[in-house]
Image (cartoon, grey):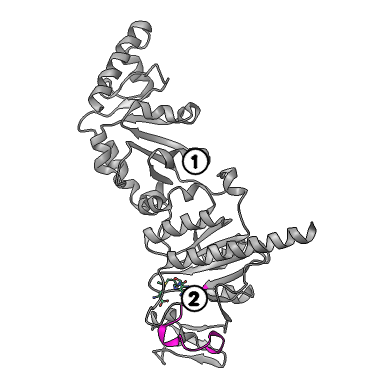
Amino acid sequence: IQADEEGRERKQVEASRQRQPRQNESQACKAVGVSPATVDIEAPAHEFRYERALPGDKRLSKVVTIAKSKKFRDRHGQVLLEGQRLLTDALDSGAVLQTLFFSRVDYLKEFPPDKLRKTNLIKVNFENIKIWSDLVTPQGLMGIFAKPDHVKMTYPDTQTKHTLPLSLICDNIRDPGNLGTILRCAAGAGCSKVLLTKGCVDAWEPKVLRAGMGAHFRLPIITSLDWDIVPNYLPAGTKVFLADNFRPDNQNKPAEVSEKASDYGWVATDPKRIFITEDGYESSSDEEDNTDKLYIPGLEVQSYFERWAQGPCAVVIGGETHGLSIESLLLAEKSNGKRLNIPVVPGIDSLNSAMAASILLFEGKRQIENTMKRKSCVTE
Ligand SMILES: C[S@@+](CC[C@H](N)C(=O)[O-])C[C@H]1O[C@@H](n2cnc3c(N)ncnc32)[C@H](O)[C@@H]1O
């Protein structure tokens, strides 16, 4: 297919040159500022001017390698996206495509021409894309975008029409597959936004993008937040609820009578921390070290299926290793929130964070929609 296409393109080029003598190769080269050896001339059918990467051209590999590093993404404010669907979603949301690597000219026709006008277009061999692709079935399209800014982005009407007063806060989610799955789930549940605190994996890392399946362009994702500014991103009056797993040895106690923070999994994973219960300081491991003392509020725990999602609310999902942070607990306490537990059978320590997120977000959706239905019945 590749060879056929390249042959066809060559013929188009020749035909174009005969029809429009001004389109000679050196002019085309001048226009794109590269040496004649690396340039292809305008493809008349699509009105795109593009470069052709010749064998040994290292631009794609270089770009992909650096775009896969968070340091690079942060320093240059660029991200790498792959595949027709993701690129289209990104363009639709207003993201700026700076460079597009493609293996077939036909693919360009799938994009609105005005979106590609200022894009540096580089045709590469499909084999090259295959080497660098992060997808199981590479699609022959990779684009370098300016890192999307949630303030400037627009989201699809179909999504915004179904948005609920429900936000998600990710607390130290480090696994890219989990974060991508959580973002996809938040988009599916109609969350109004996702807040990622510092310590979460970068939302623009290729594996997160792959698992997110376009969620990045369906709802605002606000990254690298310090806990003290999290409330600034929540609507006034938002109640913060914590997804909280119990330790199996705690399962036989009713949640309400379980007062000690150290009864919960997230404490056990960080023995250095010192916790305080209602009656004052309580050290967990090192009596000498007082620098780490923290106040743990006694927050009420309830099962996730009891009513909690009424007004604006946010759910915090804890990280895979450390669970919920103290900061999340303090925020929940301040907002009059609670802990939400998904009861699991004895012997099961906890659920995967993405699974817990999906159960809680869809329960939140169900509860909010029921309240809305009830309200609309009353007004009718
Ligand atoms: C894998 S768990 C964290 C396990 C961690 N080692 C601990 O001890 O807390 C990841 C997160 O998913 C959520 N989660 C897991 N199981 C849950 C459950 N049964 N009920 C509510 N949330 C749960 C919590 O937010 C938890 O912090």
Res. 172 visible in picture: no
Residue type indicated by callout 1: Ala
Instruction: Identify the residue shown where x is 64% and y is 75%.
Output: 336
Give the image location of residue 126, x and y in percent: 26, 34
- The answer to whether residue 277 is left or right of residue 265 is right
Magenta residue span: 243-258
Q: Secondary structure at mark 2?
A: loop
Give the image location of residue 243, x and y in percent: 51, 72
- Residues 271 and 92: in front is 92
Instruction: Identify the residue shown where x is 51% and y is 57%.
Output: 186
Q: For residue 211, which numbered disc appears in the image?
A: none
Is residue 254 inside the magenta stretch? yes
Q: Quadrant of residue 129?
A: top left
Query: What residue does disc 2 label?
Result: 244
| In the image, the residue with mark 1 has its CB under 8 Å from the nearest atom of ligand 1 | no
Which image quarter has ligand 1? Answer: bottom left
Is residue 187 inside the magenta stretch? no
Which one is closest to the eye, mark 1 or mark 2?
2
Circles 1 and 2, Cβ within 8 Å, touching? The answer is: no
Give the image location of residue 150, x and y in percent: 54, 49
Query: What residue does disc 1 label?
Result: 95
What is the quadrant of the N terminus in the image? top left
| In the image, the residue with mark 2 has its CB under 8 Å from the nearest atom of ligand 1 | yes
What is the quadrant of the C terminus in the image? bottom right
* Dot 1 or dot 2, earlier in sequence: 1
Q: Badge 1 local density, few (<14 within 10 Å), some, or many (20+)?
A: many
- 355 lies above or below 4: below
Residue type indicated by callout 2: Asp
Q: Secondary structure at mark 1?
A: loop
Res. 225 visible in picture: yes
- Residues 370 and 5: in front is 370
